[in-house]
Amino acid sequence: MNKRTAAWIAVVVVALALSNWSLAYVARSWGVPWVLGYGVSVVFDGVALLCADLALKAARQGDSTFGPGACLLIFGAASAVFNGWHARLAGLPLAASAFYAFPPMAALAVTELQLRHDRRTALRQAGRIADPLPAFGGAMWANKPVAAYQGVRQILAHRLKVKLSAAVGKPAAQPGQVRQDAPRAARPLTRSGRAAPALAGAEQAIASALAEGQKLSKRTAAATLGLEGVSEWQVQQILQRQRARLNGQPA
């Protein structure tokens, strides 16, 4: 146990002891039996501490901490309000209300600060907190503001690609890199994936015309070669396939 942990435990124990005594005084004043009065602090301060622990466990598992965090705030605030009521019941001045309200708030604040580091470490390990951006320095921003801004944008764009690739399970392509896919079977030439009788003749006619060196486009191929029953989209697909084969590329 280091000094920081020992100091945290000492503060929490003393603060909760004061809160327990104060809540017990309020409970007895409102008719709660003596034995049960000292258990009221468990309902407020104890539940708040349990919520803090649940928030830490949720962060370590990558879950949302909104629910435990909201309960921590609600029960901590309720404990502070009822502790402050102790001063009014005892006929003490207004400053005494703040005096009695601070122990539970101090215990919860110290507990939250103690768990904050562990929670952020767990969130960072789960990928829910981004690493800090590289520091370019004031001189860089003063002399090269545009270049520094573009550099930050490139870093953010790269991080976005890495996140997306991790989410979909595919490697992100680097800038200027062309992905080389494995050779695949011939793709269907129709949008529905079905073969049409006229496509075989169009494929052969376009292949022969390109082999002879004719310049064809999707609009001129149909009129030049007399293709019928073939759409411009299908002609474009055939041209792309045949040109790729002539260039020695996988179709």
Image (tube, grey):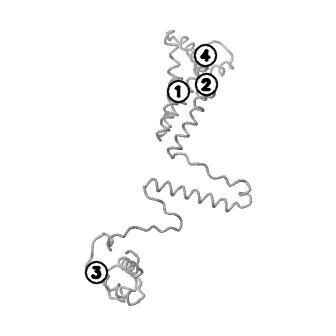
Q: Are marks 2 and 1 in contact (CB under 8 Å)?
A: no
Asked if residue 186 lies left or right of residue 92, the reply is left
- The numbered disc on residue 86 is 4
Task: Kindly indicate the quadrant of the structure image that contains residue 9.
Answer: top right
Compute the Cα span from label 3 to label 1.
75 Å
Compute the Cα span from label 4 to label 2.
29 Å
User: What residue is rendered at 50% in x and 25% in y?
Assistant: 47
Above or below, 211 relative to 89: below
Identify the residue position indicated by label 3 in the image. 200
N-term-proximal mark, 4 vs 2: 2
Say what amino acid the circle numbered 3 marks.
Ala
Compute the Cα span from label 4 to label 1.
22 Å
Say what amino acid the circle numbered 4 marks.
His
Locate residue 171, reporting x and y percent: 46, 59
Q: Secondary structure at mark 2?
A: helix
N-term-proximal mark, 3 vs 2: 2
Compute the Cα span from label 2 to label 1.
17 Å
